[in-house]
Image: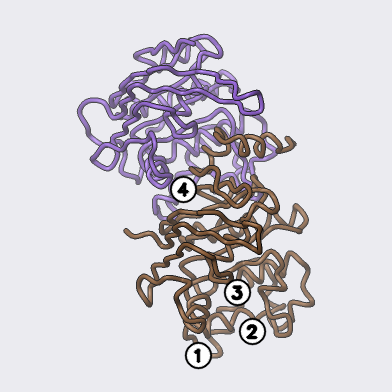
Chain colours: A brown, B purple
């Protein structure tokens, strides 16, 4: 078995500020990796570098593609990378408005991804889109409505449906429950948890919420000041943190 | 006479000699917020457990029994030494192992019964129990049947099965947790006070179920404060000294 994603010596700076420093890791098929740390620790920058949305100064991101074999994400042409991101990857943004096309219907948002992987039959696309609305607990009757008419939680669930309908091999998620009410968060976490399990997804999830990390991820990388200061099995990192920064993060969780 | 559980999963493997071997296991906690205070807990622990055996960890409170058990499961990170588990017809070393190796051992070979259930929001009790079997690729209907069978055996009222266990009593949550841990026939089972919050009737039922696993060839390591429970289950003791 080969890693799905291999990251070596990745560094990224903005001007003089180092956002990511010398990051190395492998993501194996079926793994959900959490990247945790406080705001400004570099976790979203790292995620964007992995997905090819930002270009690192040094280092490489190698992806084992179903269609193209082993590719260097940052050596691909823009067209090829866009194709890859529509067919083999998903990207769930914190703000659903960035991941959805707000001017077209929910059905079209889901259908667009299906067409990117070759679906052509209108009736099939509509049926699959409707099934997915059901799966993410949105009434089928809302298929022709635009996401502008949806609540924040519904938009996030629609974004998840849009990203997962094509059964991507790798999903990037940036704070997928950030900014939502806790009851809405619980629903989305439950949804993501069951989808990750049933679709055998591999995923990289950025979150500052250690509870979300515990629920959804197999392993964790803890980032501080752009560097990975600790990594390991999720429950081990959270229950027996080794690094001073991780101990501080874990000790800062409020008990309920 | 209690019903015997038959399982769709593979069950404990035939294997001569120990299936869990620990040598030189050493573990300290370093508390960075307190000037890197070092708290040594385990030093040079060595033990071995064979199929059909139940090893009870004994020692005063604070001696490190739970730390040892959690280290065996990979939940705590050992500083040094070796924890070898017979897994997939070979030996898997857990100290320093990749997360995916530890997770694979946990999925198929080594289960853990903790005192407390970590509740998953919104997930029904029957699905919480069925999950470990589903992860092994079991048929969903079969996994559900077996989950319901265990819940009934452990006296969880049927009208609670569709509810998330968040609002259950401590004893009910512990029994849900035991059902979840027993739904797969793990060749190795680690038990941290499996009867701590149970009344006498439920305690006897749990002891009987765990004893069946031991007799069927699982290797057990447990912490049992209740001397009666320990005498019923353990055939050896291991003294953990501070």
In the picture of the structure, the residue carrying the numbered disc 2 is A108
The Cα–Cα distance between marks 2 and 1, rounded to whole angstroms, is 13 Å
Q: Are marks 4 and 2 on the same chain?
A: no
A242 w.r.t. A193: above or below: above
Q: Position of residue B80 (x, y in %)?
A: 39, 27
Q: Position of residue A225 (x, y in %)?
A: 63, 49
Q: Are marks 3 and 2 on the same chain?
A: yes
Q: Please, what secondary structure does the residue beneath circle 1 have?
A: loop
Density class for disc 4 (Cα within 10 Å; few <14, some 14-19, many ≥20) is some
Q: Position of residue A87 (x, y in %)?
A: 49, 77
Q: Tell how many labels.
A: 4
- Closer to the chain start, of discs 3 and 2, is 2
Chain ID at mark 2: A
In the picture of the structure, the residue carrying the numbered disc 1 is A120
x 32%, y 22%: residue: B23
Density class for disc 2 (Cα within 10 Å; few <14, some 14-19, many ≥20) is many
The Cα–Cα distance between marks 4 and 3, rounded to whole angstroms, is 34 Å
Q: Position of residue B86 (x, y in %)?
A: 28, 35
- Write down the quadrant of residue B183 in the picture: top left
Q: Is A147 or A25 nearer to us in this picture?
A: A25
In the picture of the structure, the residue carrying the numbered disc 3 is A162
Front disc: 3 or 1:
3
Q: Please, what secondary structure does the residue beneath circle 3 have?
A: helix
The N terminus of chain A lies in quadrant: bottom left
Front disc: 4 or 2:
2
In the picture of the structure, the residue carrying the numbered disc 4 is B145
């Amino acid at each position: 078995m080969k890693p799905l994603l291999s990251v070596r010596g990745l560094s990224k700076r903005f001007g003089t500020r180092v956002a990511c420093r010398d990051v190395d890791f492998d993501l194996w098929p079926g793994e959900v990796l959490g990247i945790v740390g406080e705001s400004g620790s570099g976790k979203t920058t790292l995620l964007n570098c992995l997905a090819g949305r930002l270009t690192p100064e040094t280092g490489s991101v190698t992806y084992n593609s179903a269609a193209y074999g082993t590719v260097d994400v940052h050596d691909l042409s823009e067209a090829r990378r866009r194709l890859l991101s529509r067919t083999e990857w998903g990207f769930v943004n914190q703000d659903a408005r960035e991941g959805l096309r707000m001017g077209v219907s929910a059905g079209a948002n889901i259908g667009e991804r299906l067409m990117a992987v070759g679906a052509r039959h209108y009736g099939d696309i509509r049926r699959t889109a409707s099934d997915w609305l059901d799966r993410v607990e949105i009434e089928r009757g809302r298929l022709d409505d635009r996401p502008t008419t949806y609540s924040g939680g519904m938009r996030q669930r629609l974004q998840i449906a849009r990203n997962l309908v094509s059964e991507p091999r790798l999903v990037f998620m940036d704070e997928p429950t950030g900014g939502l009410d806790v009851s809405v968060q619980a629903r989305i976490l439950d949804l993501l948890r069951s989808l990750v399990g049933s679709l055998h997804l591999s995923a990289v999830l950025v979150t500052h919420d250690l509870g979300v990390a515990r629920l959804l991820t197999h392993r964790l990388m803890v980032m501080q000041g752009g560097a990975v200061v600790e990594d390991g099995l999720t429950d081990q990192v959270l229950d027996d943190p080794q690094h001073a920064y991780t101990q501080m993060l874990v000790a800062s969780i409020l008990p309920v | 006479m209690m019903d015997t559980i038959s399982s769709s999963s593979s069950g404990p493997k035939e294997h001569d000699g120990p299936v869990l071997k620990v040598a030189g296991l050493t573990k300290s906690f370093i508390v960075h917020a307190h000037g890197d205070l070092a708290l040594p807990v385990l030093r040079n622990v060595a033990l071995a457990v064979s199929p059909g055996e139940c090893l009870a960890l004994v020692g005063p409170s604070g001696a490190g029994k739970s730390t040892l058990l959690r280290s065996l499961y990979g939940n705590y990170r050992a500083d040094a030494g070796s924890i070898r588990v017979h897994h997939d017809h070979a030996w898997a070393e857990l100290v320093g192992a990749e997360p995916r190796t530890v997770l694979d051992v946990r999925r198929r070979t080594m289960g853990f019964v903790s005192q407390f259930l970590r509740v998953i929001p919104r997930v029904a009790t029957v699905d919480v129990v069925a999950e470990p079997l589903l992860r092994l690729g079991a048929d969903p209907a079969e996994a559900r049947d077996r989950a319901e069978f265990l819940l009934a055996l452990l006296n969880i009222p049927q009208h609670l099965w569709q509810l998330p266990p968040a609002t259950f009593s401590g004893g009910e949550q512990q029994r849900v947790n035991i059902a979840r841990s027993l739904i797969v026939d793990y060749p190795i089972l680690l038990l941290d006070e499996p009867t701590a919050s149970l009344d006498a009737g439920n305690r006897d039922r749990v002891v009987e179920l765990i004893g069946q696993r031991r007799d069927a060839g699982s290797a057990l390591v447990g912490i049992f404060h209740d001397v009666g429970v320990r005498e019923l289950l353990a055939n050896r003791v291991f003294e953990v000294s501070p």
